[in-house]
Image (cartoon, rainbow, N blue to C red):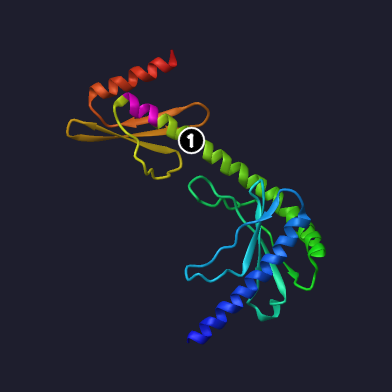
Amino acid sequence: MAEMQAKYRTDMEVASAQVRTYADAIAEILGPGWQVRPSKRDADDYPLPYATVEHCTGAAFQIGQITYPPADRDKWQISGEAPTDATGRSEWPRSGDGEIPRIKISKAKDPQTAAKEITRRFLASYLPLYAILRARVDSANQYRSDRASLAATVAGIVGGEVPTRQYDRERLAEVRVTSGNRLGIASVELGSGDKVAVTIGVDVDTLRALVAFLEGRQA
């Protein structure tokens, strides 16, 4: 068993080094802005048989070894990444966007030839799609920031607090308000344009303070 594990580790080290060398060459040929991310290892400290080439804009693709089907083991797999938002959630294509491309290229091709093929067959469709997904991520991140700022303002007026951990519902943020021995929940919603909806369950004096604040902002 130990001998098998040692052989597997050696094989993975070789595969990881091979793909890393190839990825470094590809990144250099693609030009300024492209680089290879630091290598990663799995939970058991085994090297991973792929490398990620990324651009300074965040666009990135993996070059990986193919183990199945066996007939494709003489090829590299090139697959694009989706951008992630501030919560770590990936933004995948929606209906009508098309799919993030994935191609295979022969390992027999030198890096110069492979880079040209990656540019023509992969990047030509991946980069425009990535730009669309990135714009959605940036918009979502800005929305969350605006929502959090508004929730903090409401919390300051009504004497509440914004929970550190928010459920990332589509448009709502919570403000918790303690009124005597009762806990009220204010839901702050950003609507379209400059519309805001606030639902709050607290005592009358707290509600009046919130109304006065909102009236002051409209003045």
Range shown magenta: 152-157
- Asked whether, in this view, residue 91 is left or right of residue 120, the answer is left
On the question of residue 99 being in view, the answer is no
Q: How many marks?
A: 1
Based on the displayed image, in which of its 4 quarters is residue 181 positioned? top left
On the question of residue 137 being in view, the answer is yes
Query: Looking at this view, is 47 or 150 the one in front?
Result: 47
Q: Which residue is mark 1?
A: 145
| Label 1 secondary element | helix
- Asked if residue 156 lies in the magenta stretch, the reply is yes
Residue at 52 percent across and 40 percent down: it is 141
Give percent across and percent down for residue 76.
70, 69
Residue at 30 percent across and 20 percent down: it is 209
Dot 1: within a 10 Å radius of its alpha carbon, few (fewer than 14), some, or many (20 or more) residues? few
Residue placed farthest to the top in the image? 219
Residue placed farthest to the left in the image? 181
Q: Label 1 amino acid? A: Ser
Q: Main secondary structure of the magenta part?
A: helix
